[in-house]
Amino acid sequence: MKKSFHMLDRSSVFVLLCCAGVSLSGCITDEAALDDFRPAVPYSGSQAFPITVAKGPVSLAISSRSGTLQPSQINAVQAFANQARSAGVTPITISRPSGGGASARVASEIAALMVQQGISRNLVRIATHSGPSSGPVILSYITTYARTKKCGEWPDDLSDNDMNQHMASHGCAVQANIAAMVADPNTLIVPAPSEPARAASQVMAIKTLENPKPASNSFFSFF
């Protein structure tokens, strides 16, 4: 009877260990499942407002009410032409109202000014749109540009904001400024090739490592 009692005790211990292992594995599985379905919270502006590359029109409206280009309008057209040229110039469309008259004269002046700014005449296209003769002349071209999501959205009351979470527009202004400063948005997709390092700089760096200068004692000269 004593021997059978020991055998029963060992069996009970084995069963208890098995049950404990199954319970622990179930807890681990449940915790992993919770981690998989837990929504990710952006922890930086670059994650909440990523910069993307888009393609679309850039336009400028020039009033034709005066019948000719004014000095401020000439400056605006010149800046627009320089911007188009630096963007890699797709054809520039000059669309004037179909009514003709003053708008036709202004459109002609704009086309001549574009050519003076270095835009090829083959890239300047004249088009018409419905509107009176005194309507604006619209300049446009298609380009690739960097952008991010719209800023200024405040869906929650700031007084109730959780201090452990970012506010709705946190980091948006910084991302928008970075996108506006990108000279060539295509480099965000394919980085520009790096230039080879200058040999003179490499030699100077190696010499500095081989013959380091002693630390300056100018700090102790004050004492």
Image: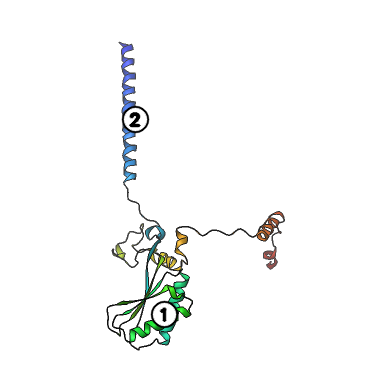
Quarter assignment of residue 87: bottom left
Q: Nearer the viewer, residue 142 or 7?
A: 142
Count of residue discs: 2
Query: Does residue 47 sit above or below 142 in this rendering?
Result: above
List the single residue furthest toward the bottom.
Answer: 66
Q: Nearer the viewer, residue 218 or 29?
A: 29
The residue located at (45%, 61%) in the rendering is: 186
Q: Please name which of the two marks, 2 or 1, marks the residue nearer to the observer.
A: 1
Q: Are marks 2 and 1 in contact (CB under 8 Å)?
A: no
Q: Position of residue 200 (x, y in %)?
A: 68, 60
Query: Where is mark 1, residue-wise?
Result: 111
Mark 2 vs 1, N-terminal side: 2
Q: What amino acid is found at the position of numbered circle 2 in the picture?
A: Gly
Query: Does residue 185 sit above or below 4 in this rendering?
Result: below
Q: What amino acid is found at the position of numbered circle 1 in the picture?
A: Ala
The residue located at (32%, 50%) in the rendering is: 39
User: Could you say which disc has been placed on residue 21 in the image?
Assistant: 2
Question: Circle 1 — which element?
Answer: helix
Q: Which colouring convention does the figure follow?
A: rainbow
